[in-house]
């Protein structure tokens, strides 16, 4: 007996399962027992189940609206296989970033090549992200991780100069509003291109503060090509809400049908007695 008690205390899986089972039996079972003693086993079950399904539908709708409770996969950045870190601007069309070859020669400086690339990206539907937007900082952090994993540049050796994005449209839109996207489960791929510029090596002199980091315009800009997995944050809550609503309506219809049968039988008995 003591060994069994110790197992319950020290095994979180077993303890969690027992907690759920006891909660269901005590809370739901007690309500059903009271209803069954007053209404009968079948009618008590329908009433109890209808109340449970309605409560689940309300709870799931709150989860669905605010993105809380039982949540799905959270959004995250993922690398594009074989084309995550692009160290030459001429390779962008081959990586699938551009539809048309970029007209930049090897003699063009890095700043001019970046300007030409910006114009071509704008013409092909890419959007420049504002440096003050939260998406800029998120893309910068993800690009730093990918650059470090590829051994291309280490943190502190580069500066993010531009972030471009394309795609990510969600559908269907509720009344055409972007704010009401609770049912927008289908999304187009959301790609992000981060432009990084290598920095000049810091000159450290004894007794003096290090020089401020400066972009080395003589070196080629590098690019991090990423795809944003938008996840499925609200999908579990949506499934719970829809499923519970269907079960609630079905049980309500069954209760309504039973009431009609009872009313018809009482009318028949009244007519027969008359």
Image (cartoon, rainbow, N blue to C red):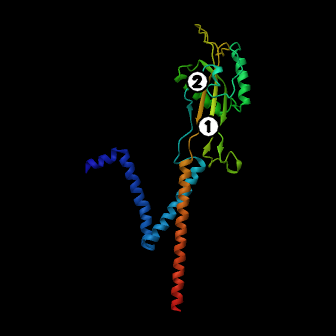
Label 2 to label 1, Cα distance in Å? 19 Å
**SS at mark 1 in the image:** loop
Q: Residue at label 2?
A: 85
State which tag comes first along the sequence, 2 or 1: 2
Q: Position of residue 216 (x, y in %)?
A: 66, 14
How dense is the environment of label 1, judged by Cα within 10 Å: few (below 14), some, or many (20 and up)?
Answer: some
Q: Of residues 59 and 211, which is closer to you in this image?
A: 59
Q: Position of residue 258 (x, y in %)?
A: 51, 74
- Identify the residue at horizontal 43%, vertical 73% (top origin): 40
- Identify the residue at horizontal 44%, vertical 70% (top origin): 42
Horizontally, is 273 left or right of 228 in the view?
left
Q: Residue at label 1?
A: 189
Q: Are marks 2 and 1 in contact (CB under 8 Å)?
A: no
Horizontally, is 174 left or right of 76 in the view?
right
Any mark on residue 225, and which? none
User: Is residue 4 depicted above or below 80 in this figure?
Assistant: below
**SS at mark 2 in the image:** strand
Q: Quadrant of residue 245?
A: bottom right
Q: Position of residue 153 (x, y in %)?
A: 57, 19
- Identify the residue at horizontal 51%, vertical 86% (top origin): 269
């Amino acid at each position: 007996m003591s060994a069994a008690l110790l197992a319950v205390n020290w095994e979180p899986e077993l303890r969690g399962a027992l907690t759920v089972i006891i909660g269901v039996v005590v809370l739901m079972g007690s309500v059903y027992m009271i209803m069954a003693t007053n209404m009968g086993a079948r009618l008590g079950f329908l009433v109890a189940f209808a109340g449970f399904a309605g409560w689940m539908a309300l709870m799931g709708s709150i989860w669905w609206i605010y993105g809380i409770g039982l949540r799905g996969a959270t959004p995250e950045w993922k690398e594009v296989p074989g084309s995550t870190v692009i160290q030459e601007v001429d390779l962008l069309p081959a990586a699938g970033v551009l539809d048309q070859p970029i007209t930049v020669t090897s003699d063009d400086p890095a700043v001019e090549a970046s300007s030409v690339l910006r114009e071509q990206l704008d013409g092909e539907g890419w959007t420049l992200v504002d440096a003050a937007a939260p998406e800029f900082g998120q893309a910068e952090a993800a690009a730093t991780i990918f650059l470090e994993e590829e051994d291309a540049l280490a943190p502190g050796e580069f500066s993010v100069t531009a972030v471009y994005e394309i795609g990510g449209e969600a559908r269907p839109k509720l009344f055409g509003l972007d704010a009401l996207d609770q049912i927008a489960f289908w999304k187009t791929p959301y790609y992000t291109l981060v432009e990084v510029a290598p920095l000049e090596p810091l000159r450290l002199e004894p007794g003096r503060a290090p020089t401020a980091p400066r972009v080395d315009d003589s070196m080629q800009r590098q690019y991090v090509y990423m795809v944003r997995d938008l996840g499925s944050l609200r999908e579990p809550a949506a499934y719970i809400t829809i499923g519970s609503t269907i079960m609630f309506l079905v049980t309500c219809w069954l209760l309504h049908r039973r009431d009609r049968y009872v009313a018809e039988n009482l009318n028949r008995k009244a007519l027969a007695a008359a």
